[in-house]
Image: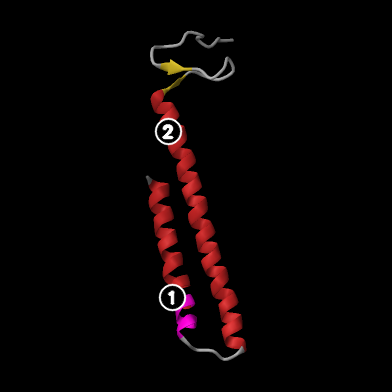
Amino acid sequence: MAQADPTMHEREWRASGNWPPLSRTDIVGIAVAGLGTAALILIATGALLINMAHVVGIFFFESVDYHGPFQRFFERLSMFGTTAAVVISLAIGLL
């Protein structure tokens, strides 16, 4: 069975003996992946809240036969907000 090379190259960092040696590029890549995941979660949460507000708004507004500016606001917020969230999520995911 082959053994791993225990020597560390120049400019590598090892958090502990159980971790592989990491270069600065590796650490930055891990940090960017974590930030990207957090950004996608925040965007998805925002889209969820927008759509839930729209659904609740539909039931409340239709229950009292309201057809004013807030109904159109929630309608457009849901339609354009969800579209923007999907586009931004795709852009972040493809980077």
Q: Quadrant of the N terminus?
A: top right
Per the image, label 1 sits on a secondary structure element best described as helix
Vertical order, 29 against 65 (above or below): above
Q: Which of the marked residues, 2 or 1, is nearer the chain's N terminus?
A: 2
Dominant SS in magenta: helix
What amino acid type should be assigned to the residue bearing mark 1? Arg
Where in the figure is residue 3, as x and y percent of width and height? 55, 9
Mark 2, Cα crowd under 10 Å, few <14 / some 14-19 / many 20+, is few
Magenta stretch: includes residue 20 = no
Q: In which quarter of the image is the C terminus?
A: top left
Residue under circle 2?
Answer: 29
Residue under circle 1?
Answer: 76
Q: Residue at x 50, y 9 (%)?
A: 5
Q: Which residue is drawn at 44% across and 60% down?
A: 85
Quarter-of-image position of residue 53 = bottom right
Distance of label 2 from label 1 (alpha carbons): 37 Å
Per the image, label 2 sits on a secondary structure element best described as helix
Residue 18 is left or right of residue 9, and the answer is: right
The residue nearer to you, when weighing 3 against 11, is 11
Q: Which residue is drawn at 48% across and 51% down?
A: 40
Where in the figure is residue 52, as x and y percent of width and height? 57, 69
The magenta segment is 69-74
What amino acid type should be assigned to the residue bearing mark 2? Gly
